[in-house]
Image (cartoon, helix red, strand yellow):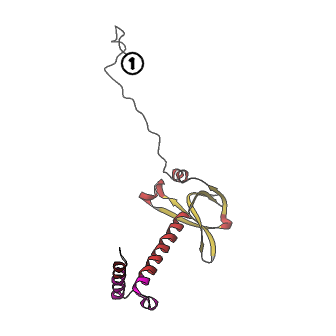
Amino acid sequence: MNEAAQHAAAAAIFEAYEERGSLTEAERAMKPADLAAARAIAAMEAAAQAEQEADSWEWAVVEIFGHRRHAGRVREEERFGAKLLRIDVPMKGDPAAHGWLTHYYGGSSIFSFTPCEREAALRANKPYEAPARLALSHRDDLDVADDEDGDNPIPF
């Protein structure tokens, strides 16, 4: 894209923002090209901050007062003027399907903190599945008494 086309595109963006009334006084004083660049930089910074927030999670098993145990993704957050541990527990072992259950705890209530892998935390929250039961049916066509030549396999 040549320089004239870039200026035309920036001017069109400026006009669209002006029509929507979403420009601040400082943005109105800017040239259209500078405004487009400033908006692009702001969008990139917001995306970088969101990515950093997504990367700030750790996976751990946390015991609270030695009585409650949670396995999930954790991070430190400030709420109510104090630092708290936030733990998001995957519901039924599958956060994509069932979502997260969030708990907040103060630092003094943490009895144990054990870092782990994502798979281990998800596996710890899977609902209990009873072992499969194998039921063998009785076969009427096999009868040991009728097997006079002995060519039948082992009867069940």
Q: Is residue 65 visible?
A: no
| Magenta region | 9-35
Query: Magenta: predominant secondary structure element?
Result: helix
Front-lying residue, 115 or 125: 115
Q: Is residue 105 left or right of residue 10?
A: right
Above or below 56: residue 39: below
* Vertical comparison of 122 with 138: above or below: below
Residue pictured at 55% horizontal, 65% vertical: 103
Image coordinates for residue 123, horizontal then vertical, percent: 52, 50
Residue 135 lies left or right of residue 108; in this view the side is left
Q: Quadrant of residue 76?
A: bottom right
Q: Percent position (x, y) of residue 25?
A: 44, 92
**Residue furthest to the left:** 141
Measuring 59% from the left and 65% from the top, which residue is drawn there? 75
Is 21 in front, or is 82? Answer: 21
Q: Secondary structure at mark 1?
A: loop
Q: Residue at x 37, y 14 (%)?
A: 144
Q: Which residue is mark 1?
A: 155
